[in-house]
Amino acid sequence: MNRIHENKSDTFILDFINKSETIEKAFKPYYENIYLKEVTYSHKLYNLQDKIMDYYLFTVDEVEKLVEAYKRGDKQSKSHNMFNDIVNEFKKLDNKEQLKFKKDLRKYQNIYSFLSQLIPFEDVNLEKLFIFNEFLNKIWIFIKKINEN
């Protein structure tokens, strides 16, 4: 049963019985996108982590610095300044690579969000990359709005 709560931002459905096609058909009238259509394994998350890092847009040290700033409660504007070099490197990619990177980033976020509700992770670097990507996604939205104006 799905319940309404003021702090709830997502719907989470865990189905052990139905096939993905059945679930997709049932939810199609209510949702534009259904993100996870297949069984998800944690190794996919590690593969995506590698793919994201292989773009060389940012380093593990930059992820660490952002997460430390986040944990300290630094102002978001200060944290956003950490992304200037990353945005400049991203702009050097061709459109196809930019889209591929964003898609990989989105997949990572979706799979991590899903798996973190099911299994405990001992690798804190997965959580750190998730936090970093949350900020990075906000930056993309901001850049997109600027470019539209």
Image: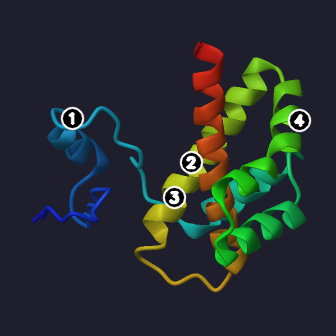
Element under disc 2 = helix
Residue type marked 3 = Ile
Say whether disc 4 or disc 2 marks the residue closer to the N-terminus: 4
Gap between marks 1 and 4 measured at Cα: 37 Å
Q: Do the residues under discs 2 and 3 have CB atoms within 8 angstroms?
A: yes
Say whether disc 1 or disc 4 marks the residue closer to the N-terminus: 1
Residue type marked 1 = Lys
Left or right of 123: which side holds 86? right
Residue type marked 2 = Lys
Left or right of 9: which side holds 64? right
Say whether disc 2 or disc 1 marks the residue closer to the N-terminus: 1
The N terminus - image quarter: bottom left
| Residue at mark 2 | 107
| Residue at mark 4 | 89
At a point 82% along the width and 68% down the height, the residue shown is 65
Residue type marked 4 = Glu
Element under disc 4 = helix
